[in-house]
Image (tube, coloured by chain):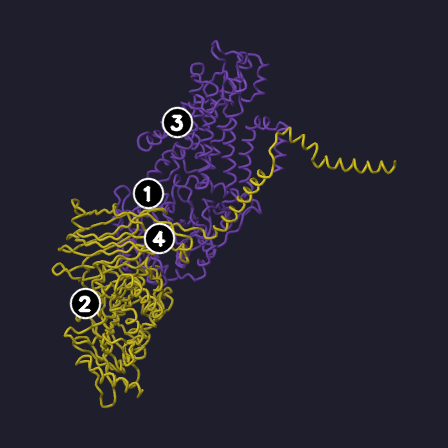
Chain colours: A yellow, B purple
Amino acid sequence: MIGSLAYCILGTLLLGAVAQDTAPQIGVNDSLWYPYDETLLLKPLPNNDLLLSFTFQLQSEAFDPAVSSHSFDVYEYYTTFPRAIPPLLESTATRQFHLRFTRGFWDALSWGQLPHGGKQAGASGVELWSLVQAADQEQAFQNWKKLANSLSGLFCSSLNFVDESRTTFPHRSYASGSASPLFNDTENLYLMRASLPNEPICTENLTPFIKLLPTRGHSGLTSLLDGHKLFDSLWNSISLDITTVCPENGDSLCHYEMEAHIDMATHVPSALARNERPIPKPLDGSSLRCDTDKPFDSYQCFPLPDPSETHLKLSQLFAKPIKNGNLFANRPTKICADVDRSAWTAYLSVDDTMFSTHDNCFELSNDQNESGSGYDFVLESLDTTQVSPVDPVPIHVGRSLTGNGQDRGGIRTAFHNDKDTPVKLIYFESLPWFVRVYLSSLQITSTTSSQLQEDDIIIDKYYLQAADRQRPAHLEFTMIIPAHSDIVMTYQFDKALLQFAEYPPDANHGFEIDAAVITVLSPESGSPVYEMRTSTLLLSLSTPDFSMPYNVIILTSTIMGLIFGMLYNLMVKRIVTVEEADKIMLHSGLKYKLLKLKEKLLKTKQTKID
Amino acid sequence: MALLEKLHRRVVDMGLVPRVITLLPVISTLCALFGFISIAILPMDGQYRRTYISENALMPSQAYSYFRETEWNILRGYRSQIEETVNMTSTERNNLMGSWLQEFGTKTAIYENEEYGETLYGVMHAPRGDGTEAMVLAIPWFNSEKEFNVGGASLGVSLARFFSRWPVWSKNIIVVFSENPHAALRSWVEAYHTSLDLTGGSIEAAVVLDYSSEEDFFEYVEVSYDGLNGELPNLDLVNVAISIIEHEGMKVSLHGLPYDQLGDNDFFSRLKILCLGIRDWALSGVKNPHGNEAFSGWRIQSVTLKAHGNGGHDITTFGRIPEAMFRSINNLLEKFHQSFFFYLLLAPRQFVSISSYLPSAVALSVAFAMSSLNAFINNDYASISLFSEYNLVAVLVWFISMVLSFVISQLFLSVLPAGLLMTISLAICFLPIALSGKVHISEPLSYRLKNVAFLYFSLVSTSLLMINFAMALLIGTLAFPMTFIKTIAVERPSEPETGTRSNISIKTEPKDEMQLNEHYKEGTLEKSQQRQKLKNLLLLILTNPFISITVFGLLFDDEFQGFDIINKLVSAWIDLKCWSWFILCLGWLPCWLLILASSFESTSVVVKSKEKQS
């Protein structure tokens, strides 16, 4: 403990404070405060759903990019910043990477926009993109591959399956790659992106994630994060963004910033009911909620919708209270509720005392909770239908596969803009190479206005054709969806045949196709304002019966054997006419030989007698 | 090869080849007989197998089903409301149901089809999955008997509500309320794969519910599984349904078997289910569809569950079947692929696989090939060159009959009534008799026409038997009497070059008969010829595809009256894209037309055989 303290003090003394307000300060009781920030935002959504957003922010110590970490006299030290990350960034020349683990269905129709403008939510499965500094694309890809493999180990995910056939170099999307420093002017920054849509997200991804945070699940908000509860939700997303920040004032010292988010949307009544009855068995007759306006007796009951009053404790949702404040950050742990104040009240409960604030934001201090019972957060409402207004999404996009059969198919994307203004967006799609897209079959139709031309909708097309086993098809369209319109974009593709060894385990499951990424641009500045993903798709390719090769081997071997036998026969035998054959048989057949033998025997006998 | 050589020489020595050639008609009939016998012995002990769940992930009935107790109250609550919607317009009814579904978070949409009405569907997104797969619970508002599916609809909504509380789903659940189980449901499935905006991923399996009674109790469950165009759902799904039903203590009926026959399991009961199964399989889509047919063609496995009778089991027991089935399907990581896609059920728990039943259809198509061979080599004209005018004319006639058949198939899709088709069919059967003495064809042409006809039919039935076994077997059986139609040869009108064979006035098919006939007097000859003509007429009527299928429908299925089946064949194509009509029109009809042409009176021709030329 003393050693590490000393280490930290040494660090601050040598390299100076990161920033004035986050400067570590040594308190009277030897406590040390670190640049770490955690907040939790609760937002009730319509239909008794609740959005919980955890945000964690931290910074590394400053470092001089000009000095290699391998040089002899450089110390490497980490305070709260996870130790695993900086060496990884250095060895792969990565300036920033973004990792997303997302699962579930975001109900944009009733919940509105994704949290954080959609920038922290990935497509279903794992999504990774990063900005890598390299001399050329080849080297960038090598670094990227290394990064993906390391992250695969770090997060127990299948990111090691990221290879060239899944990697795209986004052209205009993912512009969040904003300004990243270039340490070597002769090199370039490369933006690469890959996603694994069929990756199941589970606790084994969450645990290493929590371990990256300094509180490690022992205090502060991370003490709430339990895999069982987090993944028992309608939609959840874990995101991690690491960026390199260098001050622009010419200061040579840079630092890393880490931003981690965990967002989940859960249906409160069923989450609470699960505490009482882990199995959703039928209710008792007495606890049925029936519509008394309709026929109603002990035999029949027309069910009422979920009750609209709620009393929700955070400890009920997560089965445990918040253990404490975060204990060492320069800012206290913060919990906020984004609620309609006319219908909702939010309390912080400490040792059975309830506190409330005017802005529904609470800061958890480290020392007030002496008894160890932890903090609890309570949300109460008499009318849960009244929620603070949700931001409607700028555009609704639905994507589905069309057609039947094993050899061809189509993809249909429907854009629905119910706003008064046209929406400009970038449509990004990365399709695996075995989907052979015919861009010539691209069709834009509209159910609302018939005189639409393709050029009116798609104003810029970027298309990189797939190369078998080398590269996915990469589509990036800049589109304008007119106000109050439904636009449908369709195109057809052929399904390629895979080689026998290319089928994954559970080959009959089908092949997941990446979600399309839609980046909505601001009409004025053209900068991204909202990001969203469509659902992933399941493509069924013709899949062989995997016992078939053995049948084929047996059959071909038999046929080969027969053919060989016949050929051999033809080659070693003389061809004669039937008459000739009969003649020869008279002098050489088995019968003839037997006869000869008999004659011989008889002869010898005769001679003997003689 | 020495053994084969020896065998060959022995065969040649014994003169078997010509003997076999004369016996070809008998061999053909024997082949067909072998086909029938080989299928009739399948229900015997030792020929069939017990069903088993092939995909280990399914684990039917391993989890306790909870659709019971107060769920019954809720179901009754919904039912009392649904009972009042009978007289509503479909829009009102769908809007009401949609509002109920939305209450527990289902995303609903209404698919509007101008021709087939509105279909309401709702997607419940899976909390534990990536949302790329879906299971469908389909409830037609009116079932195949046009009864209001009140029990089914209340089960549908209360099950959906029940499912929404369960966190276990890894596949989306889609609830579909269509107007009827045939065209309306089919049009929704088609739209789902082409034009719907609200979708829930690729559909893995579908369960159609049919509970039309307003009663709380029912007696047994009928499972329908036949898909269109010979497609069957994976045996695993059928097994799961049957094992769950039996696990819940109910009896399973297949192919409309009544309650008192459900306990039987002997040779004849199995044979009965087998035959009914082949009938229903062949006529699937043409018969009143149960609902599961609508899902054929997109790799969706589907079954229909229909409640029958009164008393015994309560309606929630019926609801527990789809519940447990969905739990099972939900376990799947892969699409249904482990078990059989081609099978015949002999009893709910007994089946035969394709390798056991296929030989019968193969034998039938071999029988036709033998008849074709017979028409080619078993007469005086075997030595005619392959490119002779007769062969070419036969192929030309075949081509014309194909075109004609196609025109007929297209015409009846929209314009002409079934009665007219039957009248025409019957009328042209009399053409050979009516025109006897006026129209003659040459004898070799008659044989060549038969040759082409049977060869074509054999090819059709061979290519059909893998994908649609029942259809191949059915048309093979019904068309087989065609092979007994004989060529009528009359004396050639006096022409100079009759030459060597002018003494032979009348010929019937086999040579030895011909020689026999020479000994008869003119009168007997006339008489036997007349008899043969009448026999031909009868066979022609019997084997006309339209007459034959109508008679089959009337005799073996209570569903069809009059010329119903023709209309249903046509509407099956229009509504459901069921090919049966085209199989009849393009597979069978050209063959029949050729046989018709061949049965006109024919005149013998002198053939210069190769030996004579040399």
Q: Identify residue for label 2.
A: A179
Specify the subunit that label 4 lies on: B
Identify whether A558 is placed above or below A154. above
Q: Is residue A594 left or right of residue A536?
A: right
Specify the subunit that label 3 lies on: B
Q: Identify residue for label 4.
A: B136
Which label sits in the foreground, 2 or 3? Answer: 2
Q: Quadrant of the N terminus of chain B?
A: top right
Identify whether B258 is placed above or below A577. below
Q: In this rendering, do the residues under marks 3 and 1 share a single chain? A: yes
Q: Which type of secondary structure does the marked residue at label 4 adopt?
A: strand
Find residue B584 and report its horizontal and vertical position in percent: 41, 33
**Residue drawn at (49%, 48%) of the image:** A552
Q: Which type of secondary structure does the marked residue at label 1 adopt?
A: helix
**Residue drawn at (18%, 79%) of the image:** A19
- Number of marks present in the image shown: 4
Residues under numbered marks 4 and 1 in contact, where contact means CB atoms less than 8 Å apart: no
Q: Identify residue for label 1.
A: B183
Which label sits in the foreground, 2 or 4? Answer: 2
Of mark 4 and mark 1, the one earlier in the sequence is 4
Residue A145 is at least partly visible in this image: yes
Which label sits in the foreground, 3 or 1? Answer: 3
Three-letter amino acid code of the residue under disc 4: Val
Instruction: Tell me how far mark 3 sits from mark 1, CA to CA.
Output: 32 Å
Find residue A204 and report its horizontal and vertical position in percent: 36, 69
Instruction: Tell me how far mark 4 sits from mark 1, CA to CA.
Output: 17 Å
Instruction: Tell me how far mark 2 sits from mark 3, CA to CA.
Output: 75 Å
Three-letter amino acid code of the residue under disc 3: Ser
